[in-house]
Amino acid sequence: GAGVSQSPSNKVTEKGKDVELRCDPISGHTALYWYRQSLGQGLEFLIYFQGNSAPDKSGLPSDRFSAERTGGSVSTLTIQRTQQEDSAVYLCASSKGGGWTYEQYFGPGTRLTVT
Amino acid sequence: GENVEQHPSTLSVQEGDSAVIKCTYSDSASNYFPWYKQELGKGPQLIIDIRSNVGEKKDQRIAVTLNKTAKHFSLHITETQPEDSAVYFCAASISRGGSQGNLIFGKGTKLSVKP
């Protein structure tokens, strides 16, 4: 079946502009995660949605970052007033449920470049 | 919070040799340890995982060992093949009561298998 999809695959934006990144999880998956992968670094947890529970925003690096998940499916990660240090690959993952029991399936990522 | 260290950062082996990647974690409450393989331009893909009630797990040419006392776990790939070339990430996750399973990743190991 279809995996996790993300759009756009690449985004180049000017410093100070806002960007929106989209994630379509696997159908039926209740948990959705956003991660950031900077060059040569591991994946950094950003935010987690599980069902109708309040999202865990503990990984968001600043208040310029926000995310929402509409209807328990599609999620959008928004970065306001982008900075050059925001340049990274943003990865989305989904799983059947929350907690370590469930495998996380990753999308291909959105490569964001802030000039 | 949890911290995961991964070594080496790069590893080059001859086809047919074994490869070993090691990770240490800081939080003794971590109870789930997945390994992900990331090929160029793709999102990470789970290749094997181990839970804290198990010391070793094998899947064909891949094995993972866990030493809870020393707080380290390792990935072993035997009879390496060129298609094993990728970046490998270890991760650790804590699940306490209703908390979520966000993963804390190591910084990755770039494995190159020379034919």
Image (tube, coloured by chain):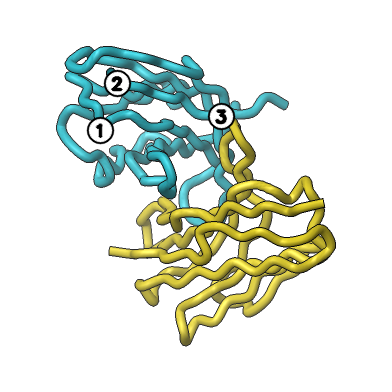
Q: Position of residue A45 (x, y in %)?
A: 36, 45
Q: Nearer the viewer, residue B93 or A102?
A: B93
Q: Residues within 10 Å of mark 1 (few under 14, many from 20)?
A: few
- Callout 1 touching callout 2 (CB < 8 Å): yes
Chain B display color:
yellow
The residue tagged with tag 1: helix, strand or loop? helix
Residue A72: horizontal and vertical position, in percent? Answer: 44, 26
Host chain of mark 2? A
Q: Mark 1 = which residue?
A: A85
What label does residue A108 carry, if any? 3
B1 left or right of B55 in image? left
Q: Nearer the viewer, mark 2 or mark 3?
A: 2
Q: Secondary structure at mark 3?
A: loop
Question: How far is disc 3 from disc 1 in space, using C-alphas?
Answer: 21 Å
Q: Badges 2 and 3: C-beta atoms under 8 Å apart?
A: no
Compared with B32, A36 (above or below) is above
Judging by the rendered image, the residue that carries numbered circle 2 is A114
The local secondary structure at tag 2 comes to: strand
Disc with the residue nearer the chain's start (3 vs 1): 1
**Observer-nearest of B28 and B61:** B61
Which is more N-terminal, label 3 or label 2? Answer: 3
Mark 3: give few (<14), some (14-19) or many (20+) Cα within 10 Å.
many
Is B8 situated above or below B112?
below
Tell me the amino acid under the disc marked 2. Val
Q: Colour of chain A?
A: cyan
Chain name for mark 1 = A
